[in-house]
Image (cartoon, grey):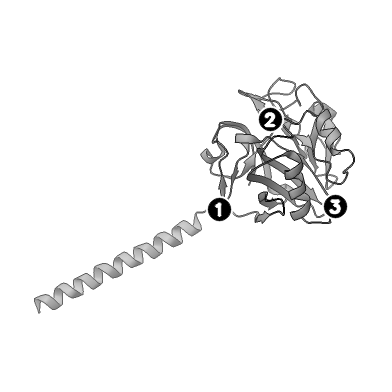
Amino acid sequence: MLQLDVNYRGIAAASVLAACVVLLLLWGSSTRLPHSYTYFKADASNNVELHALISRPGEITLQSADGPLSNYSGYGINGGFFYEKDLLSIAAVNDKPVGGTRGQYGSGWFNVKYPRGTLVWDEAAGAYSVQVVSSVSDIHVKDRERYFAQGGVSMNLMNENVWEYAAEQEHLPYPDEKRLRSALVYGADQRLWLIATPTLCTAAEFRQAILETIEPGMPKEGIFLDGDGSAQLNSAESRLTGDSRVLRQIIIVK
């Protein structure tokens, strides 16, 4: 009888342990970050591997940062260019720069030094655009309290004849070197693709991979974001850490 009682106790303990594991799994599932995106991964014919989060403009927010993307709980990618603590690309929501005050250097109010391709979501118009501008003041939208603007460098995905010249004029860093890269791309259906690659590639190779794998043959446009070790992506499915450098601005899926 003693041995039988011990066995029952062992079975009971195992049952309790199993129940705890199930409860922990259920709790973990219920507390995971929201999935207001679709995850995408593709390998282009030029061997460039793309990872992307596909979301809607209402689910996107821009914010300043003070660490690698992996330090943040949200899903998203890196933003525009920066130097030390200063943002060198526009990053503004509803006419407010994410890193400081209006008109302040390094706040996200300016594309510093050069007019550069800036992806703009105009909520009142219900449309995206890429506008080559120097500051937030130059951006054209219907309602300055209902938009966001992310600076980078124009990709000119629908214009093969000018994209290299435009990228040169906008001073895309190291276009012909094999670097990690990232981008924002939109199509006709208001979806926004937050894209990064762990493949060392030239700007032309990265752009070609996007043309080939992101809604091939369909109208789309976008911008190059920061690259090299800054090319970072977080999702439930994948994490690209670049060189884990500190970022100063990120793009997050709410």
Type of amino acid at the residue the image marks with label 3: Pro
Residue 98, compared with residue 146, is above or below; it is: above
Q: Quadrant of residue 4?
A: bottom left
Task: Quickly name the residue at label 2.
Answer: 81
Type of amino acid at the residue the image marks with label 2: Phe
Of 88 and 230, the residue lying toward us: 230
Residue 181, compared with residue 43, is above or below; it is: above
Compute the Cα span from label 3 to label 1.
Answer: 29 Å
Question: Considering the image in quadrants, where does the N terminus appear?
Answer: bottom left
Q: Is residue 128 left or right of residue 92?
A: right
Element under label 1?
A: loop
Task: Quickly name the residue at label 3.
Answer: 219
Compute the Cα span from label 3 to label 2.
Answer: 26 Å
- Residue at 58% x, 53% y is 34
Task: Quickly name the residue at label 1.
Answer: 236
Of 160 and 234, the residue lying toward us: 160
Type of amino acid at the residue the image marks with label 1: Ala
Of 167 and 88, the residue lying toward us: 167
- Residue at 40% x, 63% y is 23
Return the x and y of residue 119 as percentages of the image width and height: 78, 39
Element under label 3?
A: loop
Compute the Cα span from label 2 to label 1.
Answer: 25 Å
Return the x and y of residue 123 as percentages of the image width and height: 80, 44
Labels 3 and 2 touching (C-beta < 8 A): no
- Residue at 45% x, 62% y is 26
Element under label 2?
A: loop
Using a 10 Å C-alpha cutoff, classify the residue at mark 1 as few (fewer than 14 neighbours), some (14 to 19) or many (20 or more): few
